[in-house]
Amino acid sequence: DVQLVESGGGLVQPGGSLRLSCVASGFTFSSHVMNWVRQAPGKGLEWISYISSGSVSLYYAESVKGRFTISRDNGENSLYLQMNSLRAEDTAVYYCARGLGAGRQPVDYWGQGTLVTVSS
Amino acid sequence: EIVLTQSPGTLSLSPGERVTLSCRASQSVSSTYLAWYQQKPGQAPRLLIYGASSRATGIPDRFSGSGSGTDFTLTISRLEPEDFAVYYCQQYGSSPFTFGPGTKVDSK
């Protein structure tokens, strides 16, 4: 079975940093694009970042560009999101999300999410 | 950035009814890279439709998608009790891969 398990969320002060991790299992990780999608409390879904299967293509939402960095380690079946200069509006559940395959793909599997709270 | 608008914001319906949800894009969605997701409270979203009209694995055939360019539709032919949820569209053809604001389908 496909599993995506996020970790690294928590409470952080404004201006601080966090690194989210996602460990994948049950599929060939290196064959799939990956994304991070977030959802603020009581709000809708916001796509924030994409990484191609070989890490060649990286895309970001304007709201996080220059502050967040997506990366992956295909040997460790892991996806990461380095989040710097955090703001209150970054408070959300962050989902690790698998693309259906390579290239431009919808998300077909989601992790359970990890909550990031930015507050003093 | 492609902005997606969904209508209506909320639909109050009864089981057995036909449901039509709309997703309109601010510019053409390339190669029909349009998906629909269902999300229930406390759960991660679930992929229903991709490529505007292809059902994802395990999705019942009461769910169907149609449309092209800037106008897309998700139809539930006969609403089941488990279908009460929020539905989102997403375009994944052009970065940023934006989501619509969602349509909530609740019980009348």
Image (tube, coloured by chain):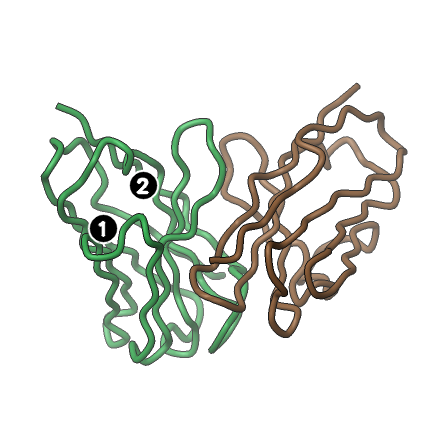
Residue that mark 2 sits on? A114
Q: Amino acid at mark 1?
A: Leu
Q: Which chain is green?
A: A
In primary-sequence order, the first of circles 1 and 2 is: 1
Could you tell me residue A18's position as x and y percent? Answer: 15, 45
Q: Which chain is brown?
A: B
Secondary element at image label 2: strand
- Front residue (pair A115, B105): B105
Instruction: Sort mark 2 into few (<14), some (14-19) or many (20+) by Cα contacts within 10 Å.
Output: many
Question: Is A34 placed above or below B42 here?
Answer: below
- Front residue (pair B54, B102): B102
Residue that mark 1 sits on? A20
Question: Is B29 placed above or below A46 here?
Answer: below
Q: Residue at x 20, y 36 (%)?
A: A87
Q: Are marks 1 and 2 in contact (CB under 8 Å)?
A: yes
| Circle number at residue A30 | none
- Left or right: A26 with respect to A56? right
Q: Residue furthest front?
A: B27
Q: Residue at x 38, y 48 (%)?
A: A95
Could you tell me residue B10's position as x and y percent? Answer: 69, 28
Please identify the quarter of the rendering in which residue A10 is found.
top left
